[in-house]
Image (cartoon, helix red, strand yellow):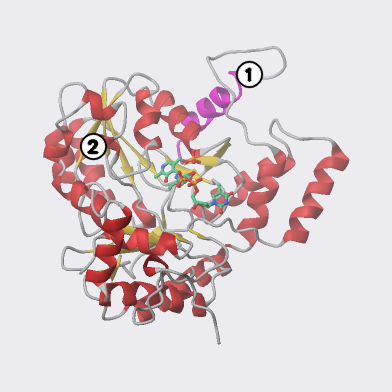
């Protein structure tokens, strides 16, 4: 006779870990599992770097990656940097932004921090619930005499309303730039994201579609701006012993660039694997009450880097209850960008009423549930994961009761 899975397990209940069963997965299933590309190609490059003893400061691999990215995006300049955040900071400074800059609160905190770090006030505008990107009308309403710029974020790789933002920026004399951390390899129609505004910034953090362990890039058609960024990213050096500008250290290393080149060679396969996962989730989540996949617009190319679902008010469990159910099964689902940047410090203290002007941001922050994706994920795993969600929703009352008994917060 088999022993019960756990002393608390009731045989009449579905085999959910929150109800006492063993977790469905022995090892944690993470959102943001790094893509590695062809390991032997990376190791060949690594050996070459070690053999040549050229580790950083604009080496061969950095130069090669910059030219490949510029060609892929269709822009004249790519400046690789140590991470996306420093890329934003450099660009903000190089463009001479001051006073106030309008940003979404539905973004990773780095977008706002890159401004505040330089004593520039991020002013939060609301989003379009269809795209999760800045709503141009809300941006216009946030403009004051102190506003100098707008930073759009192409959230989940879906393009911002670039035409409307461009027209608004032109009309009001503001600089427009984009945080394209999610959007490497994505397009708006035929034009690649990266080619809009004054410049755009990618992140190549470990969790991104193409990673350089840590890293980022600023892409722009503006040669003068690119030149300034190159100086600023390397202490202001122009040649040996000659500093002509205020700068910092924002350089990318050769090993990082080697990883980027290796990942880039697999970009098409990585995107195809994520797209296949998206279709598999669509199949296995079909018909679940209140849970739907974030839609992509087929007119634009996406990298499907994030598998985004939305848990509506009509779902029998809240988003946070589903997160608790999944975590108990070892599925490390994430609530990006909960609770919204406006509810994080120092903004929360500085702008305690910001949430009043951000109703759509607030609603989306309560709904988004990001699930694992990536080339290592088998369809059988996706089916099992979706089966857990289905089973939890079908037994919502019992699940809720058990979560409450454990003291798990069920909504925030
Ligand atoms: N703008 C936007 C819109 C961004 O999304 C980001 C970064 C930036 C700007 C700034 O760019 P960077 O300066 O980072 O280049 C993660 C990433 O750290 C962050 O890069 C990313 N956005 C953000 C959306 O996600 P966390 O706090 O969720 O990271 P963490 O450590 O919890 O990792 C996420 C998941 O990935 C975990 O469940 C575990 C897994 N993971 C992570 C790492 C680092 C791995 O399996 N292996 C790993 O090596 O922020």
Which mark sits nearer the N-terminus, 2 or 1? Answer: 2
Q: Is residue 65 above or below residue 34?
A: above
Q: Position of residue 157 (x, y in %)?
A: 39, 56
Residue on which disc 2 sits: 169
Q: Closest to the observer: 123 or 331?
A: 331
Q: Position of residue 228 (x, y in %)?
A: 51, 25
CA separation in Å, label 2 and label 1? 33 Å
223 displayed left or right of 189: right
Q: Secondary structure at mark 2?
A: helix
Q: Position of residue 281 (x, y in %)?
A: 39, 75
Residue at left offset 27%, top offset 28%? 347
Q: Main secondary structure of the magenta part?
A: helix
Residue at left offset 38%, top offset 74%? 388
Q: Position of residue 332 (x, y in %)?
A: 45, 58
Residue 354 visible, this orientation? yes
Could you tell me which quadrant the N terminus lies in? bottom right
Q: How many marks?
A: 2
Residue at the far bottom: name it: 1
Residue at left offset 11%, top offset 36%? 141
Q: Quadrant of residue 383?
A: bottom left
Q: The magenta stretch spans which residues?
A: 220-236
Q: Closest to the observer: 235 or 368?
A: 368
Residue at left offset 28%, top offset 43%? 339
Q: Is residue 357 above or below residue 18?
A: above
134 displayed left or right of 304: left
Instruction: Check if residue 338 falls in the magenta segment.
Output: no
* Tag shown at residue 237: 1
Q: Residues within 10 Å of mark 1 (few under 14, many from 20)?
A: some
Q: Secondary structure at mark 1?
A: loop
**Within 8 Å: ligand 1 and the Cβ of disc 2?**
no
């Amino acid at each position: 006779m088999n022993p019960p899975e756990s002393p608390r397990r009731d045989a009449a209940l579905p085999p959910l870990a929150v109800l006492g069963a063993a977790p469905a997965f022995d090892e944690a299933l993470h959102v943001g599992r790094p893509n590695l590309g062809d390991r032997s190609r990376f190791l060949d490059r690594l050996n070459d770097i070690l053999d040549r003893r050229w580790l950083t400061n604009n080496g061969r691999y950095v130069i090669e990656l910059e030219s490949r990215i510029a060609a892929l995006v269709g822009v004249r300049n790519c400046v690789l940097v140590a991470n996306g955040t420093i890329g934003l900071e450099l660009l903000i400074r190089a463009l001479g932004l001051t006073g106030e800059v309008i940003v979404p609160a539905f973004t990773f905190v780095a977008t706002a921090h890159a401004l505040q770090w330089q004593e520039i006030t991020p002013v939060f505008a609301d989003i379009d619930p269809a795209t999760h990107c800045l709503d141009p009308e809300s941006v216009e309403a946030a403009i004051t005499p102190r506003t100098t710029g707008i930073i759009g974020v192409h959230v989940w790789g879906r393009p911002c309303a670039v035409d409307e933002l461009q027209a608004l920026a032109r009309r009001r004399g503001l600089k427009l730039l984009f945080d394209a951390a999610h959007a490497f390899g994505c397009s708006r129609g035929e034009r690649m994201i990266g080619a809009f505004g004054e410049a755009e910034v990618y992140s190549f953090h470990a969790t991104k579609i193409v990673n350089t362990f840590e890293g980022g890039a600023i892409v722009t058609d503006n040669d003068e701006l690119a030149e300034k960024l190159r100086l600023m990213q390397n202490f202001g050096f122009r040649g040996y012993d000659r500093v002509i500008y205020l700068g910092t250290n924002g350089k990318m290393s050769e090993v990082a660039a080697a990883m980027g080149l290796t990942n880039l060679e697999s970009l098409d396969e990585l995107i195809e694997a994520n797209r296949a996962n998206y279709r598999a989730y669509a199949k296995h989540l079909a018909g679940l009450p209140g849970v739907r996949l974030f839609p992509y617009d087929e007119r634009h190319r996406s990298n499907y880097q994030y598998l985004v679902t939305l848990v509506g008010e009509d779902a029998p469990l809240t988003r946070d209850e589903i997160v608790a159910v999944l975590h108990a099964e070892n599925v490390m689902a994430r609530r990006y960008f909960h609770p919204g940047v406006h509810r994080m410090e120092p903004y929360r203290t500085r702008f305690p009423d910001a949430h009043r002007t951000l109703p759509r941001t607030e609603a989306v922050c309560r709904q988004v549930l990001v699930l694992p994706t990536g080339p290592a994920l088998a369809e059988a795993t996706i089916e099992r994961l979706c089966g857990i969600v289905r089973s939890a929703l079908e037994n919502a009352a019992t699940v809720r009761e058990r979560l409450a008994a454990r003291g798990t917060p069920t909504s925030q």
